[in-house]
Image: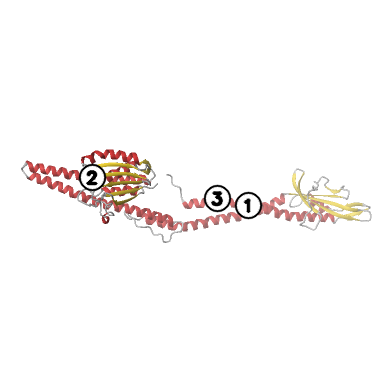
Amino acid sequence: MKAAGSLRGRLLLRLALVLSLLLVLGSTASYLNARRAADTAYDRSLLSSARTIAERLYNDAGELSVEVPYIALDNFAYDITGRLYYQVLDMQGRSISGYEDLPAADDSIAMTDDYPALARFYDDEYRNVGVRLVSLLQPISGASTQGMAEIRVAETLEARERMARDLLRQSLTNLSVLAASSLLLAWLAITAALRPLQRLRNEVAERRSDDLRPISTGGLQREVVPLVEAINHFTGRLKENFERQRDFIAEASHELRTPLAALKARIELGLRSERSADWHQALHEAQHSTDRTIQLANRLLSMARIERGARAVAEGSAEQVPMAPLVQELAMAMAPLAHSQAVALALEVEAEFAVWGEPTLLQELLGNLIDNALQHTPPGGQIILRLRAGQLLEVEDSGPGIPPEERARVFERFYHQSSAGSGLGLSIVGEIVRAHRAEISLHEASTGGLLVRISFAS
């Protein structure tokens, strides 16, 4: 699987994306605020120009007139901030001065509340250029003239846009410096925050392959501690498995060394003799010892298969196994061996059920239970296999049974209750039961023998 990349880089990239989004939003808000501030400043200037013209209105023989100085006209034609236009209308709406085609204000536009004047501000187009206009109503009263005159002043938008751009540029500069500083500080903070992970990496890298001690959680962040604890839990289980394998190998070596040494001694003893009867006796004893060694080796191989099967079950490769056909098939296979030992083998199915498991392991489980019962059941005895309600599997024999004080030890590897057997039969059973998350218990049978009960999870 491809590496996911640097955690520091991913954090900084996401922070940069967030800051970029905030920069765009901040820039938009800054531009709108700058434009609003420019409108406020230049609207005041527009209204001041309209008032200047209103002060020049006078009554001339019953007619409204205005006297605008030449220099004022020049300023209205072209101001340093942009082009200015004006128009004066008398009480009857007739244009008496200025540009005659300035756009009129729509009746739906309300009077401004920002200034103490009968004025309306609005945007429109004049001579194919966007303009901002103010319409000021000026009361006129005289002996023969009364009413409202209107003064319109228009200004092109270059100055407002220039002011808004300057304010936006300044805001963008400030925000960019702030974003870059934030990223730098974030990089420093993330680097400092990840330093315990670097220490953790170095600690793990410097360990020997057989060093499975728990990793110290001191100095680690609260979010990292669960990860380290999970690693410690895993290494603890791994250490336990290694120790079990080491103990198993040591015990297996000891168990195999004894019968192999005995086999060699019997063969050497037979070779020293010159009588054919001694040779025959040595070969007979060697065959018996070889059989026991082969049985022990098979048990050891079964333990290895169980560990692989247990991992398969833990990794989710278990399947639904109907127990009734499985038990019946194995009972039929073991029936000839039981018959040869004069032992009756019976099967009682009180309730059929299926369990989640690995079929090979379940066959190994039943085979070891039946084999263990056959080893301890005398001729004329019986073995009963039962499937009961509640996901219960029982194997009952009429042998000598197991004393209560020894029942907990019989599941230990290489524990011998008697000289017969390898000491691995019930140990294998216990391993398979644990692999299937089932429970096993030993009881005294009604016949005085042993009753093995296994409860599978439903």
Which residue type carries mark 1?
Ser
The secondary structure type at the circle numbered 2 is: loop
Ranked by sequence position, the earlier of labels 3 and 2 is: 3
Position above or below: 341 against 175: above
Say whether residue 361 is left or right of residue 141: left
| Residue at the extreme bottom | 218
The residue to which callout 3 is attached is 17
CA distance for labels 3 and 2: 81 Å
> Badge 1: few (under 14), some or many (20 or more) residues near its Cα, within 10 Å?
some
The residue to which callout 2 is attached is 381
2, 405: nearer the viewer: 405
CA distance for labels 3 and 1: 15 Å
Say whether residue 280 is left or right of residue 86: left
Which residue type carries mark 2?
Gly
The secondary structure type at the circle numbered 3 is: helix
Which percent across, then down, holds residue 59? 91, 54
Residue depicted at x 88% and y 50%:
91
Residue depicted at x 32% and y 49%:
453
446, 416: nearer the viewer: 446
> Badge 2: few (under 14), some or many (20 or more) residues near its Cα, within 10 Å?
some
| Residue at the extreme front | 446
Ranked by sequence position, the earlier of labels 1 and 2 is: 1
Which percent across, then down, holds residue 244? 29, 52
The residue to which callout 1 is attached is 27
Which percent across, then down, holds residue 456? 36, 47
Quadrant for the N terminus in the image: top left
Which of the 4 image quarters holds residue 323? Answer: top left
Viewer-side label of 3, 1: 3
Ranked by sequence position, the earlier of labels 3 and 1 is: 3
Say whether residue 17 is left or right of residue 427: right
> Badge 3: few (under 14), some or many (20 or more) residues near its Cα, within 10 Å?
few
On the question of residue 323 being in view, the answer is yes
